Amino acid sequence: MSRAPAHRAPPLPASSRRSALRCLGATLACAAVMGAVGCGAKLQAERAQDYPLEERTRYAWVTEEPVLIQIGEPQPNVRTAANEKNLRAAIDRELGSRGFSLVAKDEAELLVAFSVGTAMRYRIEGGGPGTSVGGIQPGAQQTKGTLNIYLFDRATAQEVWHGWTSKWLSKAEDPVAVADGAVATVMTMYPNGK
C-alpha cells in the first residue's frame, strides 16, 4: 500500500519566522511566569521602597473594633471573634519582639491591619487502578487560609508594607498555634525580621 505524500506548508519569509519566534518566546516567557506564580512561595511581602520602615517603632491598630476578620466572604470556622483575638495578640507579640510599641492612635507612626482570605476545595476520593468514574466521589472539604498583614503610614494613610502567607487548614489544629505560626511566618519578611 502506498502513502500519499505529506503536505508541507510553504516556507515562511525570514521576517515572518522572526515574528513567529518572538511570539513563541513571549508565550514561553509568559508560561514560565505563570508557572512561577502558581508554584511559587506561599510567603510574600511588598513595601514602599522610599519609606523608612526601619525607623518606625510606634504603632496602633487601624481600628480597635474586632471587625477586621469579618471582611470578606463568610466562613464560620475561620472568621470568628476568637480568631480575631488570636491574630491581634500574635501580631502584637511579633511587633513587640521587634522593638515596636503599641501606642495611642494619635501617637502612632504606623497603623496595623490584617485580613483573612479563604478558598475551599474538595479532595477527590475513591478510585484507583481499574475503578470506574462512578466509584470516585468528593471527599472532605478543605479550607485554605491566607493571612495578610498591612502597615500604613498614619500621617498619609498610605500602605507602606504588606506581607502574606497561605496554608491549608485542618480542624484538628489549635487555632492559637495556627495564628501564632502564620503571623511569625509573615513577619519574617519584615525588613528587620528575625
Image: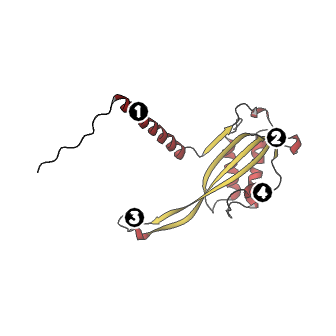
Q: Which mark is residue 154?
A: 2
On the picture, is 82 further left or further right than 6? Answer: right
Mark 1 and mark 2: Cα distance apart in space: 50 Å
**Residue that carries the numbered disc 4 in the rendered image:** 67
* Residue 132 vertical position relative to residue 8 in the rendered view, above or below: below
Q: Helix, strand, or loop for circle 3?
A: loop
- N-term-proximal mark, 4 vs 2: 4
Q: Which mark is residue 19?
A: 1
State the image coordinates of residue 75 (x, y, percent, origin top left).
67, 62
Mark 1 and mark 4: Cα distance apart in space: 54 Å
Identify which residue, 158 or 57, lies in the foreground.
158
Mark 3 and mark 4: Cα distance apart in space: 46 Å
- Amino acid type, label 1: Ser
In front of the other: label 2 or label 3? 2
- N-term-proximal mark, 3 vs 1: 1
Residue 171, located in which quarter of the rendered image?
bottom right
- Amino acid type, label 4: Val
* Residue 52 vertical position relative to residue 137 in the rendered view, above or below: above
On the picture, is 72 further left or further right than 136? Answer: right
- N-term-proximal mark, 1 vs 4: 1
